[in-house]
Image (cartoon, helix red, strand yellow):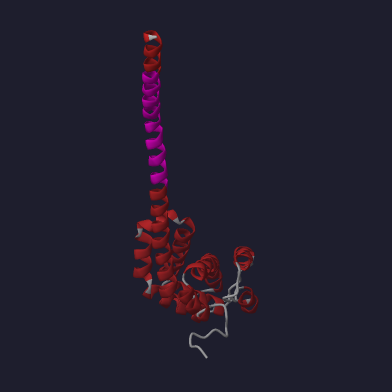
Amino acid sequence: MDFCISSVYFNDYLSIINSFFGKIAFVPIQVFLITVVISGILSDMEKSSRLEKLNILIGTFFSETGTKSLKYFSKIDSLIDEIGSKLKVTDSWSDEDFKNALNYAKDRDYTLNASKEDIIEIYEFLSKNKEFLMRLLENPNLMEHEHFTELLRAVFHLLEELESRENLHESSENDIMHLNGDMVRSYRLITIEWVNYMKYLKNNYPYLFSLAMRRNPFDKTAKTSLK
C-alpha cells in the first residue's frame, strides 16, 4: 500500500517536473518569434517612413521644377496632342489606367523640335533652379530611388551641356540636334516619374491630386482655377 502511494506521488512529481521543463524549453522559441515579429513591424515602419520622405522630395521636385520642365518640353513636342490624350489623368482613373499610361510613357518615341529661343528659355529656367536641384541630389533619402536619381542626373547633364556653350544664340544645327537629344532624355524620365507620382497622389492625397490634375503639363486645356 505504501509502495502504491509513493509511486503515485513520485509520478505526479515527474509530471510536474516534465511540464516545468517543457514550458521552459518553449520560452526561447517564444522570445525568438516575438523578436522576429517586432523586428519585422519596426522594419516595415522604417521603410514606410523612408518612402514617405522620398515621396515628399519627389513632390517638392514637381512643385518647384518638374511640372514646369514638362510644360517647356511638351510645348515643343511634335506629338503633344497624342501624349495629351494618353496622359490626361482624371479622378476616375484606376490602377490599370495608370499602368497603361506608365507603359506608354516608357515606350513612346519622344521627339522635340526646339529652336534656339526654346533652348535659351529652358536654360534660363534650369539655371534658376540649379541650387534647388543640387540640394535634392545631395539628399541621402534619394539613394533608395534609382530612377529618380537617374532623372536628376539627366537634368544636370542637360544643364551642364547648356552651360558649356559660350553663346547659345549662335548654336549650330548640329548643336541644336545634340541638345534636343539631351532634352529628350530628361523629358522621358520626368514623364515616367510624373505618372508614378500622380498615381501616388490619387491613392494617398486626393486634395493634392486635384491640384496636380489641374496643372497637368500635357493637357493644353488644363486650368488651375475652378469653374
Residue at the (37%, 36%) spot, across then down: 31
Residue at the (37%, 32%) spot, across then down: 27
In front here: 26 or 68?
A: 26
Residue 137's x, y, as percent?
A: 38, 61
Residue 195's x, y, as percent?
A: 55, 68
Q: Decide: is 185 above or below 12.
A: below
Q: Any magenta on residue 70? A: no
In front here: 194 or 53?
A: 53
Q: Any magenta on residue 36? A: yes
Q: Decide: is 35 above or below 212.
A: above
- Number of numbered discs present? 0
Quadrant housing the N terminus? top left
In front here: 172 or 108?
A: 108
Q: Residue furthest bottom?
A: 227
Name which quarter of the figure residue 98 lies in.
Answer: bottom right
Q: Is residue 26 something one can see in this rendering?
A: yes
Residue at the (40%, 30%) spot, across then down: 26
Residue 8's x, y, as percent?
A: 40, 16
Prevalent SS, magenta region: helix
In front here: 215 or 204?
A: 204
Residue 212's x, y, as percent?
A: 49, 76
Q: Relative to 41, is 200 on the left or the right?
A: right
Q: Decide: is 143 above or below 119.
A: above
Q: Is residue 72 something one can see in this rendering?
A: no
The magenta segment is 12-40
